[in-house]
Image: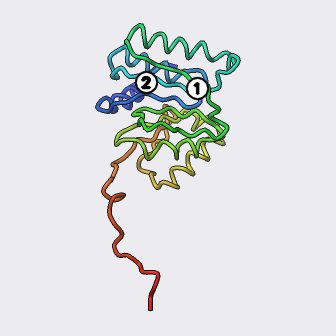
Amino acid sequence: MKRSIVLENILKSTNNLSGPVVEFGFTDGKFSRLILSAMIDGIVIPRPIIMYGYFEKGGLGLWHKAADIVNESKNRLKVTSTYSNEDIAGGYTYKSKTAPPISIVNCYTNTFNLLNSIYDLLPENAIILLPSYFTEKHANKQIEDFVNYKSIQKEFVSSKDISYIKRGPVNKSLTNKPPVREISPNLT
């Protein structure tokens, strides 16, 4: 897959944000590799790539692809990338408090929970790439359910090129306001 102008523009929009790229459900590493090449070409600022997937006992031969991305990040960009064995499909939720400006969600059975665990951490303009939206019916349904649950239809872009969610404005003032009025349990 070649890096498209659309993907490059999506990635460039995160250059003012700090933090890593996080891939949940490392499949073939295609998107991590595309993002790495955009970093090498100077389109995207260099940042660590953290890949979560099933790498145990060779992980279907995927560990070496992740290791290549880690080594190339270190050698060409002087950035420390990592990969970790996690059962993404088995109910994994993102536990780090570091908000990734770029996330890749490649999960088919746990997509809703995974999106729900990362979305509220994201800063404004962060991107969640959803490569499985058009290829996996089950993931498609969970993504649509999540978009409806969060009422973020305006943030979701469904495209044959690449589907993604771009985090809209984060209104922190709403979460810190006291209730309009206290309700007393003793109404006499």
Residue 124 vertical placement versus 182 (above, below):
above
Q: Is residue 152 above or below residue 95?
A: below
Q: Which of marks 2 and 1 is in front?
A: 1
Quadrant of residue 85 within the rendered picture: top right
* Percent coordinates x, y for residue 154 in the rendering: 41, 50
Residue 112, percent from left and from top: 58, 46
In the rendered view, tell whether residue 11 sits above or below residue 170.
above
Count of picture labels = 2
Q: Residue 118 carries which label?
A: none
Circle 1 SS class: loop
Q: Which mark is residue 26?
A: 1
Say whether disc 2 or disc 1 marks the residue closer to the N-terminus: 2
Q: Which residue is drawn at 46% across and 23% down?
A: 49
- Answer left or right for 87 relative to 124: right
For the point 33% across and 22% down, the residue is: 45
Question: Label 2 belongs to which residue?
Answer: 4
- Kind of residue at disc 1: Phe
Residue at point 33%, 58% (across, down): 176
Q: Which residue is drawn at 52% across and 29% down?
A: 23
